Image (cartoon, coloured by chain):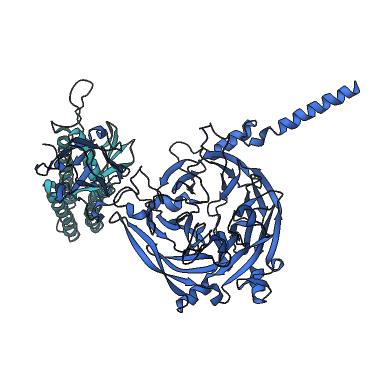
Chain colours: A cyan, B blue
Amino acid sequence: MKKASLIMMIGPLFLLGLFAFPLWNIMLGAPQYPEPLGMNIHIDGIRDMNEFDLQNIDGLNHYIGMKTLPKPEDMWEFGTFPLVIGGMVALGVLIGLLGFMGKVSYKWFMGWFVLMSVLGILGMYDFNEWMVDYGTNLDPHAIMKLANPDGTPMTYKPPLFGHAKMLNFDVTSLPSTGAWMMFTGMMFTVFAFFVGWKSQKSE
Amino acid sequence: MKKYNYFITALIASVLLLAGCGNQNGNGGSNSALASNNAEKVYVAPGEQDEFYAFLSGGYSGNLTVYGLPSGRMFKEIPVFSQFPTSGYGYSEETKPMLNTSFGFVPWDDAHHPDISQTNGELDGRWIFINGNNTPRIARISLSTFETEEIIEIPNSAGNHSSSFITENTEYVVAGTRFSVPVPQRDMPINEYKGNFKGALSFISVAPDNGRLNLEFQVMMPGFNYDLSHPGRGKSHGWFFFTTYNTEEANSLMEVNSSQNDKDFIAAVNWKIIEEYVKNGGGKKMPANYAHNVYSDETHTGTTTMKKEVLTVDPLEVPGAVFFLPTPKSPHGCDVDPSGQYIIGNGKLSADLTVHSFDKMIAAIEGKKFDGEAYGIPILKFEDVLAGTVKSGGLGPLHTEFDGEGNAYTTFFISSEVVKWKLGTWEVIDRKPTFYSVGHLMIPGGNSRKPFGKYVVAMNKITKDRYLPTGPEMEHSAQIYDISGEKMELIYDFPTHGEPHYAAGCPAELLAPKSKKIYRLDENKHEFATLTPDKARVERIGNEVHIYMSTIRSHFTPDNIEGIKVGDKVYFHITNHEQDFDVPHGFSIIGQNTSELLIMPGQTKTSIWEPKKVGVWPFYCTDFCSALHQEMQGYVRVSPASSNIELSWSLGD
């Protein structure tokens, strides 16, 4: 159980990577952008992949009537997410510590994992909602109003995961370092649960 | 019958002989395997990039052109000494000062010899320098912006030809005069040239941090013609070598009268000794008047300072500073091998090359083995300094470059060929024709301690039938040879722009990674910049109107302007707000008496417009910037001089 608790203490610390590394990355390449434009989505805001990328994405998007990318102060999520992640790290380490001292059972480890997963899915849902709004809530006075072959107005929601062709742009959206670290940390807690469960059985 | 057979045999033989000569024009067309092999060597596939940068001087275009090797594709023309309406260089208010001289605004020059900055004798890719031959000037061009940053005029000089060669740590860029002149200039009979004219050799220091040029001193030499020069390197670092012709000091019908002496000189100048002499207070200050023009890529503006004094050095007052090396037949090119041991004098009226030995020269100086003097300057004995003679069988050697493998490559103007020979043994290894009458040649780094001996580019003076004819005036031709093997191989032929004299090349990776993509708007310190669109405005000061305008895809802010009157002097100060690579905006307005402006991202440029007619006049973006480029336009309302319409400006209402 001591070993399991140690693993449980280490796992949540991986989530601290989200404060340094982006959660998600979206790249936009086009014939005239052989070096693609890119945005990194951090838990506290959207940043340039290379300097001036956001400015240039906004500049291009104005043709099709998309809003400019949100600044940290424009979305409550960028204030809240760091608090939630910070809280979950503290909670996870605390659970590990209490497990180490024998105050809580290994089942709490799974409890933390489930809570984190639910929060993660909610976060993804919220992120997707924003992308839908960003890609479909277009300025009616847009310079270029394009229609799909079936006559419906064309929209520009970036993919949540994977690749999509949008006009002249190839858009690729994938989890980034921060997300992978979060995933690793969460796997640690599941592992801690199993180690705890096994040590219980052997006793 | 027997006779008849002889005749047939002779006929067949001569046909075979002719066929054998069929490849003399070097196009390789009759041997398709060879031709396709050569095609592969120069083929840079779409999307791929060249291995080397090549900077070819523009000669009478006054500019510098940038090419890729081995493809021969031209990337850019960098305006230096000539007005360039394509970008507005020399027309915009910011760049007009770059062409100021003591003779006023001189919008043209003859640009000859580019040289890339060096550290420890190796190319470092910070700057490239080039000389203006006609109104003596030296320019420094940034190799991150590829723009002219500085031009300094050279006083007491005329025909600034043995220039702009740099010492091996870029301590100095050196500029010698081809035409000797009275110093100071004065009204005197031309035929009193002999003994009275002077030849100034100018040493211009280069500040290591920002490249700033300063004319440190001029060595006032006898009135010969200082034709070309190159620095010593390695063991001969600290010396500079200049070829001379017209040691006869003729002043008329020079083609005959200055070709009478069997030998002219290579002047060996120990600039380290002179530098020391000057540091200790030596030399004589004389009044002068010359322009120093500096461009800042923060203010995006050039400024002119007139300098009023120059330090001159009489070589006779500095013992051990200058010696003459007799060199046959009006030597032209003066080239130093990568080790610094050999100084090659290309005797342009002979078949041979004269190679002097630096070690022998030092020994002769130390042994004081002099063969008389010229105007008090010791002349060394020809035999004492001679390392060897290259008997080439060619005619009219001009210039030599090196491959770093112990071989030298010399151009022969009259016999129109490049000859490869071996340093030390002086044996000729190979020769290949050029098309036609080659001047300079260039191996990337070929005049440094570390050449990149893969290609040589031969730059020719005569084009004739090489390309589709374009009337009497044609661009000059250049050829690329693969020199990686024992024998040279002609692999490509391409037209150049202007008249390239010398060129300089370097590996692409030295420059490509640091080539600037944009100017940062947040570093723009232009006096008339419009840093945010809400600062766009129009101001009147008497009859001067200043329009502070910004651009971004795809509109001008403002794009409707009223209240301008006939007789106003309207300044369009335009700031490009793009911060995206390769998105310039242009600006032009009907009836503009200058050129358009081409404004790079983050840059501010100014054009003056003096409306002469009442009306509503359009302006527009000249660079196809986006899908809505055609819509990037605006109007200026011009009212009669007596009108009292207030200034107003707007966008989008």
B635 relative to B40 in the view: left or right = left
Which of B109/B38 is in front?
B109
B131 relative to B432 in the view: left or right = left
The spot of residue A47 in percent (x, y) is: 23, 48
The spot of residue B517 in percent (x, y) is: 33, 48
On the question of residue A43 being in view, the answer is no
Which of B523/A37 is in front?
B523
Q: Residue at x 77, y 30 (%)?
A: B14
| Quadrant (top left/top right/bottom left/bottom right) for the N terminus of chain B | top right
The residue most toward the right is B2
Q: Residue at x 52, y 56 (%)?
A: B161
On the question of residue B279 being in view, the answer is yes
Q: Is residue A95 above or below residue B315?
A: above
Q: Is residue B607 above or below residue B43?
A: below
The spot of residue B599 in percent (x, y) is: 29, 45
The residue most toward the bottom is B280
Which of B368/B135 is in front?
B135
The spot of residue A170 in percent (x, y) is: 30, 35
Which of B176/A125 is in front?
B176
